[in-house]
Amino acid sequence: MIKKIFLLFLFSSFSVVLFAQQTKEELQRKQQDLLKEIRELNATLKNIRSNKKRSLANYNLVRRKIAAREELIQNINKDLHILDNNIYKNTLEINRLRRELDTLKREYARSLVFAYKNRSNYDYLNFIFSASTFNDAVKRITYLKSYRQYREQQVANIEKTEDLITDKIATLNNSKNEKSIALQDQNNQLKDLEVDKKEQNEEVNKLKSQENEFAKEIRKRESDRRQMQTAISTIIRRELAEARKKAEAVAKQKRAAEDERKKRLAEQQRQERLARQQAANNPNNTAANKPDIVDEPVTTGGTTTKPKTNRVYSDLESTDEGRALSINFEANRGRLPWPVDAGLPTIHFGKYTIPGTKIIGRSEGLYIAVPVGAAVKAVADGQVSAIFDLGGEQAVTVIHGKYFTTYSHLSSVNVGKGQDVRPGTVIGRAAANDDGEGEVLFMVINEHSVFLNPEQWLRRK
């Protein structure tokens, strides 16, 4: 039982060390990403605070900064855990090497004492010449050489072990220094977290004092949301209707081609029967003795077939291009580029509340704070389906097979209806919201007019 527990302990220790080796660099990269995000959040908040009116964006940015700070602290804690494991492991290794060094030194001391006691050349010669045979003398000479090499190896082992101890001590000191720095960083982040929480409380109090203004803003957003839903649903219905017409036209062409093929085949068979009858009525016709030749069925070219798969295809995927766009869009789920180069989410997808109030809002997409006039870009290959106006601002919908993306709150549009776009194609420029700050609304919709969470499709920043 004790043996099993010991083996389990060794396995657990090995697993911890292996885990540490695999995640040390990942944790450091993650910490750098979080620090970069916090810097961007602070810069955005600094720009927004030039506006005296406090908006929901302020609160959401502060809340996101707190979440990023807490995640950063968790990563530092994991880093500290790895450092503690390294320190413990190196301490054990140093103690083991020191015990090994003591053993080597004791053995070397004994060999020195033996050599001292037998230091006379006469003793060595006497040891050799006292051999009974020549072969025995050779063996004694070989033994003395081996013994000398053994002593030299002892010295080499001692020096090597001392070097290993020196290296391990340096590694241990380095881990301790890293731990000290990490602890200091952790303390600084904890202090900053307290400041962020106080800042959040201030934002909440200001939001409470502006409940009526926010109620009006939420009502306006809700009205815009319904108009947006109606406009996008209309666009999708139109695209579906056009796709069905194209699919029906293709099917009609296929049916006509099939009917023509059957008609030709029937005429061919009739001609063959007539020929056989004529041959039967004419005994001298040697063609009657030949085997019948049946022509291969005639197939029409130019038709496209859907690849064999369990996938249920939409009318929007009735063409090779539509299928390719859909499959490409799905294949890049979670890896699509952001529609803006630099921006931070202010309102996320789904329901949200105004802290300290009973007001509840809903977003069908992702609101992103950006500088006014910032370029808004397509996230995937597609074609511009519609450009429409909403409350004095413009919006663009791009079709990607059976998926749609919409880019709203644009001050200007750089594309035209029917234009093919690629990832990075500039769709338009970001407009200012009611608070005077740049803002973009990005949405992802499927063929059933169901709005999807954009953050599940975009790559993690």
Image: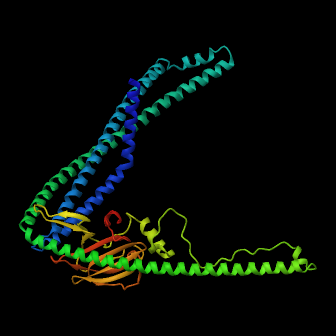
Q: Position of residue 200 (x, y in %)?
A: 13, 60
Looking at the image, the residue that sits furthest to the bottom is 416
Q: Residue at x 32, y 54 (%)?
A: 28
Looking at the image, the residue that sits furthest to the left is 209
Q: Position of residue 45 (x, y in %)?
A: 17, 68
Looking at the image, the residue that sits furthest to the front is 281
Residue in the foreground of this view, choosing between 19 and 318: 318
Left-right relation of 281 to 394? right
407 relative to 97, above or below: below
Q: Is residue 154 in view?
A: yes
Q: Residue at x 68, y 16 (%)?
A: 133
Q: Residue at x 58, y 16 (%)?
A: 127
Residue in the foreground of this view, choosing between 112 and 357: 357
Q: Count of labels shown?
A: 0
Left-right relation of 307 to 52? right
Q: Quadrant of residue 121?
A: top right
Residue in the foreground of this view, choosing between 64 and 93: 64
Q: Residue at x 31, y 56 (%)?
A: 30
334 relative to 230, above or below: above
For the C terminus, the quadrant is bottom left
Residue in the foreground of this view, choosing between 84 and 190: 190
Q: Position of residue 405 (x, y in %)?
A: 35, 73
Q: Is residue 374 in view?
A: no
102 relative to 409, above or below: above
Left-right relation of 330 to 50? right
